[in-house]
Amino acid sequence: MLTVTEAAREQLTRILSTVDATENSAVRLVPSSKGFKLQVDRPRPDDESYSHEGNVVLVLDKEVSQMLSDKKLGVQSTQDRKRLTLV
């Protein structure tokens, strides 16, 4: 199971508020040619979900969940912003 730090959950909440996501929307990690990308989506019945303060902020489908089972989603601070990191 993917480990998601509290800082990452907070960052996901900020991302959702920045893009004015609709209620019940969450960030989905989607495979891309450069690894994974973030996409705002709605949770699906078979998704693995991660919450922050009672709201779902991250969802993964079964395939992505298996791919990331030994990974950790965290936050790295740079001079001008915070960014999600997957290690």
Image (cartoon, rainbow, N blue to C red):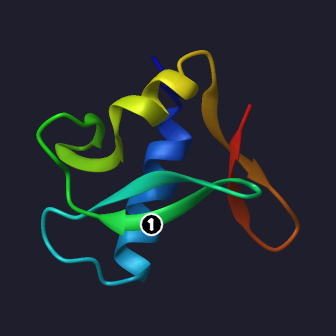
Residue at left offset 76%, top offset 48%: 76
In the image, taking residue 57 as reference, residue 24 lies left or right, namely left
Q: Name which quarter of the figure residue 24 lies in.
A: bottom left
Indicate the position of residue 52 as horizontal and vertical percent values. 30, 43
* Residue to which mark 1 is pinned: 39
Q: Name which quarter of the figure residue 18 lies in.
A: bottom left
Indicate the position of residue 51 as horizontal and vertical percent values. 28, 40
In the image, taking residue 19 as reference, residue 8 lies left or right, namely right
User: Relative to 17, is 86 above or below?
Assistant: above
User: Relative to 17, is 82 above or below?
Assistant: above
Residue at left offset 31%, top offset 84%: 20
Residue at left offset 82%, top offset 74%: 80
Secondary structure at numbered mark 1: strand
Q: Name which quarter of the figure residue 19 lies in.
A: bottom left
Indicate the position of residue 55 as horizontal and vertical percent values. 20, 49
User: For this rendering, which residue is in front, 54 or 49?
Assistant: 49
Q: Quadrant of the N terminus?
A: top left
User: For this rendering, which residue is in front, 11 or 60?
Assistant: 60
User: For this rendering, which residue is in front, 22 or 13?
Assistant: 22
Indicate the position of residue 75 as horizontal and vertical percent values. 67, 46
Residue at left offset 25%, top offset 37%: 47
